[in-house]
């Protein structure tokens, strides 16, 4: 490996005669004191390179068909919301300066089928939720996933034929799902299925249906991850039903790869994505950095359910200061180059930012 030059000059050792008086222990560099700027809150604020604001946050919320709220066991502090509580929550997010929410449906098992037909029902849970939020708060951004996993009995994001998750046939259904959601008033379509070619196909379908202004935020570099566990609990989706030859690793990315993430992102941009996403977040900050530096497009990171639950559990057990850890983790995304973060902590973080 060739050694890269440092991006700053390294101070040269001075002749002892020119050196000002300093304790012997400091050796050659008595003038360089990195701690001066760190000494007070005001000077730390002055030299801070990155900042988190409420405008950087997207809040993912879970909806169910019942009227009230229902706790999600593996995500303490996060509830499934009925339409009333959802609209209330949307109002709170908006008041705190959060620009957008992402709505995920916990579809009752009775409505799930092998092919996930409920995804195309214009009166399904997610479409009703979008209409309710947009009616109350037309200026709050609403994001919906395009993928079949909330609607299929097997929990896959696509159609299963002979144990295979089939690509092209799935993409045709995803295009219809995107249109149904756009018709309900969804502002941003977020394909999270990882089928090949779906961003371009969804863009064409939206344009042809008169939704040229509906944005696409693609889950461009989405890894097959154990950190999605609590999410599947939240929406009641199975990870993989027995009998399938393939699991989610046959379409989501291998966590060993980051060059491949750049290819995925390049394709999605070429196909018409307005914004791209890396998911999960904290274990993949290197990917966030590479994507932002390589393409310079609006880049988001999804701090997923397992990342939320892991911080939350440690905080709830008194093992660390949960609020400080939350703010540190979220700032880490900004430092890595993300323009924004999808996080279940959005409300807590926005409240914390407001109180300063
Ligand atoms: C569905 C989807 C998943 C997540 C977002 N959209 C799960 C999956 O792909 O299995 C995970 C989000 C989270 O864990 O918070 N395609």
Image: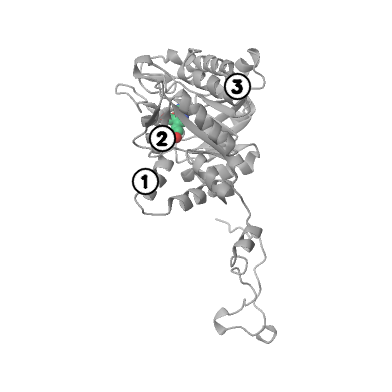
Mark 2 lies on a secondary structure that is helix
Whether residue 39 is visible, yes or no, is yes
Whether residue 336 is visible, yes or no, is no
In percent of width and height, residue 224 lies at 43, 34
Number of other residues with Cα within 10 Å of mark 1, as a class: few under 14, some 14 to 19, many 20 or more: some
Number of other residues with Cα within 10 Å of mark 2, as a class: few under 14, some 14 to 19, many 20 or more: some
Q: Nearer the viewer, residue 231 or 198?
A: 231
For the point 33% across and 22% down, which residue is it?
A: 244
* Quadrant in which residue 256 is drawn: top left
- The quarter of the image holding the N terminus is bottom right
Q: Give the residue pinned by disc 1.
A: 313
- Label 2 CB-ligand 1 distance < 8 A: yes
Q: Give the residue pinned by disc 3.
A: 200
2 vs 1, front mark:
1
For the point 48% across and 17% down, which residue is it?
A: 170
Outermost residue to the bottom: 17
In percent of width and height, residue 281 lies at 49, 41
- Label 1 CB-ligand 1 distance < 8 A: no
Q: Give the residue pinned by disc 2.
A: 228
* Quadrant in which residue 233 is drawn: top left
């Amino acid at each position: 490996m060739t050694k890269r030059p440092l991006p700053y000059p390294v101070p040269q050792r001075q002749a002892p005669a020119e050196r000002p008086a300093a304790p012997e222990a400091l050796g050659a560099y008595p003038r360089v004191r990195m701690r001066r700027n760190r000494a007070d809150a005001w000077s730390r604020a002055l030299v801070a390179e990155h900042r988190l604001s409420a405008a950087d946050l997207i809040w993912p919320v879970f909806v169910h068909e019942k009227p009230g709220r229902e706790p999600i066991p593996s995500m303490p502090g996060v509830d499934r919301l009925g339409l009333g509580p959802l609209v209330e929550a949307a109002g709170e997010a908006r008041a705190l300066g959060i620009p957008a929410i992402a709505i995920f449906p916990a579809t009752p098992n009775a409505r799930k089928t092998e092919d996930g037909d409920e995804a195309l029902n214009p009166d399904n849970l997610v479409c009703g939720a979008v209409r309710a939020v947009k009616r109350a708060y037309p200026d709050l951004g609403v994001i919906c996933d395009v993928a079949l996993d909330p609607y299929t009995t097997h929990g896959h994001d696509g159609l299963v034929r002979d144990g295979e998750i089939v690509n092209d046939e799935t993409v045709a259904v995803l295009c219809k799902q995107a249109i149904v959601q756009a018709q309900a008033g969804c502002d941003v379509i977020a394909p999270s299925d990882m089928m090949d070619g779906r961003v371009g196909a969804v863009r064409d379908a939206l344009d042809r249906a008169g939704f040229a202004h509906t944005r696409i935020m693609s889950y461009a570099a989405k890894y097959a991850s154990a950190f999605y566990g609590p999410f599947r609990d939240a929406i009641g989706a199975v990870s993989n039903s027995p009998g399938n030859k393939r699991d989610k690793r046959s379409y989501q990315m291998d966590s060993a790869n980051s060059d491949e993430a750049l290819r995925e992102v390049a394709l999605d941009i070429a196909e018409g994505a307005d914004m791209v996403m890396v998911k999960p977040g904290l274990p993949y900050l290197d990917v966030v950095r590479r994507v932002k530096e390589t393409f310079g497009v609006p880049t988001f990171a999804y701090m997923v359910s397992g990342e939320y639950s892991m911080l939350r559990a440690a905080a709830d057990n008194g093992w660390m200061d949960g609020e400080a850890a939350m703010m540190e983790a979220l700032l880490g995304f900004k430092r890595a180059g993300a323009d924004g973060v999808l996080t279940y902590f959005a409300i807590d973080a926005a409240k914390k930012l407001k109180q300063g």
